[in-house]
Amino acid sequence: TQLLEQSPQFLSIQEGENLTVYCNSSSVFSSLQWYRQEPGEGPVLLVTVVTGGEVKKLKRLTFQFGDARKDSSLHITAAQPGDTGLYLCAGGGADGLTFGKGTHLIIQP
Amino acid sequence: GAGVSQTPSNKVTEKGKYVELRCDPISGHTALYWYRQSLGQGPEFLIYFQGTGAADDSGLPNDRFFAVRPEGSVSTLKIQRTERGDSAVYLCASSPGGAGSYNSPLHFGNGTRLTVT
């Protein structure tokens, strides 16, 4: 079973600050997806990375896939209250799509 | 267009009862997934359909859980003799991907919150 560990589990910061959350595994994944989930709703895909070392930007969000395709990071610049949510990473591989437990992010105005 | 629809949005049942949870995927999506999400946790894989057949049911926790997709569109997750530990949000997702589509992005519904009392 491929396991994904996300850190930190909880993060509460002030509006305007920068932050990075991490997704780590001992397994290699063929792709890695990041989702954002709000209370009462299903996860919504933010980005998919497939190449080791790949960096993708989505406005103030920067996603990076590790060179060895075992880990990923999400960096948010100048966080806003609308960024509040549960951020989930999910690795694709032979065992299917495996989700981490997520990072609960709260941006305080 | 319409997204993934799940009904009911909430279900409260007594221990030992039988429940059915329904998922209407996005039209034309061949792949359909069921996940279970407990409070504070990430989604846990249950079963994956490609068309009408269950391509991978390795995540079903025991034989009380069963899912069908008879016409390759709507799917029903069935839980027999419910237990309090079955309480969770059951999420359905669909994807346009074909065989080996585990890397395709998933489109999730809002889930069914099941509470077993």
Image (cartoon, rainbow, N blue to C red):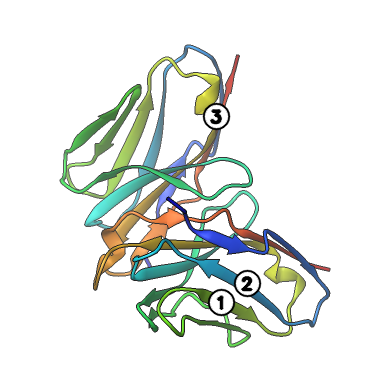
Please identify, in this view, whether the residue under mark 3 or under mark 2 is nearer the observer: 2
The percent coordinates of residue B28 (x first, y second) are: 34, 66
Q: Earlier in the sequence, mark 2 or mark 1?
A: 2
Residue B62 falls in which quadrant of the image? bottom right
Q: Which mark is residue B105?
A: none
Q: Secondary structure at mark 1?
A: strand
Label 1 or label 3, whichever lies nearer to me, is 1
- Report the residue marked by disc 3: A84
Q: Please, what is the three-letter code of the amino acid marked with disc 1?
A: Thr
Residue identified by numbered label 2: B21
Where, by quadrant of the figure, is residue A22 drawn?
top left
Is the residue under label 1 in contact with that under label 2 (CB below 8 Å)? Answer: yes
The image shows residue A89, relative to residue B70, as above or below, that is above
- Which quadrant of the rendered structure holds the C terminus of chain A? top right
Tell me the residue that label 1 is attached to: B76
Say what amino acid the circle numbered 2 marks: Leu
Of A103 and A36, the residue lying toward us: A36
The Cα atoms of the two marked residues, 2 and 1, are separated by 5 Å
Which quarter of the rendering shows the N terminus of chain A? bottom left
